[in-house]
Amino acid sequence: MNQIGPIFRALLRNKVGALLLALQIALTMTIIVNAIHMIENRSSMMARESGMDEANQFHLMYVGYKDSFNERVAVETDLLEIRKLNGVVDATQINSTPLSGGGWSMGLTTTPNSQDGTPVSLYFVDDHGLNTLGVELVAGENFSQTEVTYRLSNDKQWPQNILLTEAAAKNLFPDLTPAEMIGQTVFIRDDEPMTIKGIIDHLQAPWVQWSNVNNVMLVPQRGLWNANRYLVRTAPGERDRLMREVEELLLAKRDGRLIRNVTAMDEQRDDAYQDFFALQTVLWVIVTVLTLVTALGIVGMVSFTVNQRRKQIGTRRALGATKGDIMRQFMLENLLITGSGLIIGVASSIALNIWLVDTFSLPRIGWHYLPIAMVVLVIVGQLAVLGPARKAANLSPALATRTT
Amino acid sequence: MIAYYGRLALLSLKKNVLLTGLMIAAIGLGIGAAMTTITVNYLMSADPIPSKSDRLFAVQVDNWSPNEAYDEPNLPPDQVTWLEATQLTEAKMAYRQAGMGTSYGVIEPKGKDQKPYLASVRITYADFFPMFEPPFLYGSGWSTQADEARELVIVLSKEANNEIFGGANSVGETVTFSGNVFRVVGVLDEWEPKPKFFDLATGAFNDMEDVYMPYTLKQALELDTSGNNNCWKPIAEETFQAFLNSECVNSQFWVEFEDPDDKHAYLDFLHNYVAEQKQLGRFPREQNNRLHNVMEWLEYQEVVADDAQMMMYMALMFLIVCLLNTIALLLAKFTGRFGEIALRRAVGASRRTLMLQYSVEAAIVGVLGGLVGLILAWLGLQGISALYGDSTEGLTSLDGTMIAVGFALAIVSSILAALYPTWRACSIAPAGQLKTQ
């Protein structure tokens, strides 16, 4: 360790070179820390569950365009026939699905005409909704077949009973347990009362970036509007076959409608998070290439200084320094430079994060990113210096001291 | 002389291929990353209608709830109601004006082997076509009389015309849309303004609609509303007309002025209009009317995605790292040549000539780095468009400006990077250096 003094003094003779390398390492750390933070942030959003049985579900849209198309007859017979298909677990009509990016939201309140409502997204389903979605009741009951009604485009009336996700219900009644929430009244459209019939564990709203993404209300109604959607849940492994069969079944009716967007739920997930995945990939590429550039820069710099210091190395070796001493000299020198760069890096990483928090409302970085990044960069620096340092150590003293 | 320096530079660059390669790679990677992300941002914020972007204005009026603003801080809604879209258009107080919205419907097959076609619709007024200047392949837009008489006229996009008529001139033909027979008056050519500035509600880079028809038909045919619909007040009755008369915003309203300064007179008109509406019991908030021209509107609506900006800042920092790398490498390289430099100084070369010589060397590195960078940028843009899919269509092409910017950035940054090392190399005292030899 008593080598640090001479190494430090040697560094001072090439202040600018060392400073440039230190700055480079500081910036590298800043970028890596913040990029990984963004990647992690997106990963945690992507890891949130929709609450559905995504691997075994698909949905499709149908649009009636002939006057002869009777929405009510269609939905009743279609669902009976789909449910009878071999491999179908259950099916329901639904206006939208989680991860789809398009849907309907309304505000609920616990007192009539109150100002601050709890936003919930709405799914219109029948008594098969829960089973098709694959969600569990935490308390209360599912809709019964008889309470499912029909809804026209301009209807303003709301049914008596509804189901809520536990998250939505907690927003409305923070102090009640799920069992106590059953039978409570909530208001929609200012003063129309509805009763909570059941609480379901978890289901996402259609918008993955919505701040209230866990607030969902299930409404026991079938929509009689021109365009609507069926959601189908199948036995494992049967989905792809049934996607074709259900579409064929509906098209074969030739009742003046078209079928669009037959979509598997996990495909829907990929679509919903495509931008997230893309940003992550771009950042990974930047982080990887950046680390490589920095490492290669170190290799280049050290190779060059080794070349320049051939004579000194030869002299040190001639005076009794071992190969290990020479190796250690270059490794320690790099450690000093990298270390000071990383100390600047901690400050600039935090500074950049503060700016990102302000400008793009990103969350704060966790402190654990900093030591991890430091350790990784120290290792990268040491590995980069290993090759040139070994070359220096292997210089023959006799050759190295000879004047060129 | 420069040519001679060029030869010298090439010789010196060849002498240490590893170092030269590292420098070119560093600049190339930095430029490549920066250019990829700058291009995406540049195309996202491009002027979609340069000939008149300063004369087209998006109109906002504040019909929102008395209790809370549409958005903080006290911002009016981004869209307007059906009432404003129709009344303001019919007031004709600007040079041109068009309310508009979106709908959808099914176009029935013409022949046996055709399939029904689900079409997205832009409903708007006659002025839409002269205002936004979509190119016509056949025919033209409809007339103001058609708006007033609620004629069943339709303009097809090129795509829809290909689908329904196999690309033939269909002007004068009919199509059956949701049970009504429409007459084709025009067919558009390819038209994909990016961003889709006149309707940002459902995505700034969405596809254009398949067909266009008069906004006045929304009431007449009770057309469905698609896109974004926002309400603060419950709708009074269960009728379509009650929905139209409601305070729900789901339409856009644009005006064109002959002179941008006409906006002041138009703001006065809006003030009077809102005052009148207040008499009718609407507009409970204070007057908050706004006009934004196209570029202001794109800025106000923050069309450039946060992700694209973050990527660009990351890439620019990456470029700085690459430049620091290059400075350090050049410094090392020039330091190794102090002896040679001292000799040249001693035999009469002035500092200026040496500076020039080494700048030429740096510029060659810059040009080569720029070339590598542009190739990488092109690859990077292919990657971005593969990763993001359709949503980046039209946002990932390098145009002449961007190629020029790329080269300029590469050369300027490599000369900047060479500045300090060159200065260091040329300011050594020849005598001292020569003595140590």
Image (cartoon, grey):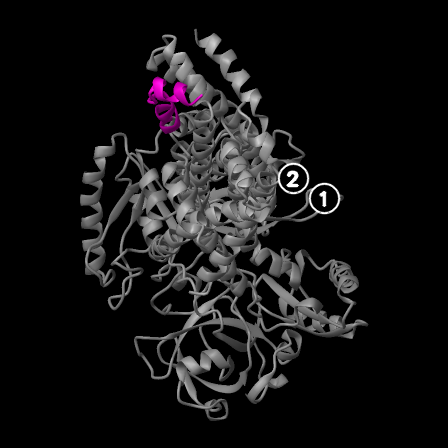
Q: Do discs 2 and 1 belong to a common subunit?
A: yes
Q: Mainly helix, strand or loop, the magenta region?
A: helix
Q: Residue farthest to the top?
A: B1
Q: Residue furthest bottom?
A: A180
Q: Which residue is mark 2?
A: B164
In front: A319, or B20?
A319
Q: Which residues are magenta?
A: B419-437
Label 2 Cα neighbours within 10 Å, binned few <14 / some 14-19 / many ≥20: many
Residue A139, horizontal then vertical, whole percent: 55, 89
| Residue type for callout 1 | Gln
* B200 lies left or right of B384: left
Q: Is residue A142 visible?
A: yes
Q: Looking at this view, is B189 or B165 the one in front?
A: B189
Q: Position of residue A263 (x, y in %)?
A: 67, 59
Q: Residue at x 43, y 27 (%)?
A: B335
Do the residues bearing badges 2 and 1 touch, measured as CB atoms within 8 Å? Answer: yes
| Left or right, B127 with reference to B266 | right
Q: Chain of mark 2?
A: B
Determine the chain carrying the residue at label 1. Answer: B
Residue B306, x across and y down, in percent: 42, 50
Q: Quadrant of the N terminus of chain B?
A: top left
Query: What label does residue B114 carry, if any?
Result: 1
Instruction: Name the amino acid, label 2.
Output: Ile
Q: Residue furthest right?
A: A86
In the depicted structure, whether residue B128 falls above or below residue A373: above
Q: How busy is the neighbourhood of tag 1: few (under 14 within 10 Å), some, or many (20 plus)?
A: few
Whichever of callouts 2 and 1 sits on the residue coming sooner in the sequence is: 1
Give percent across and percent down for residue A392: 57, 39
| Residue shown at the point (64%, 36%) measured from the top left | B162
Quadrant holding the C terminus of chain B: top left
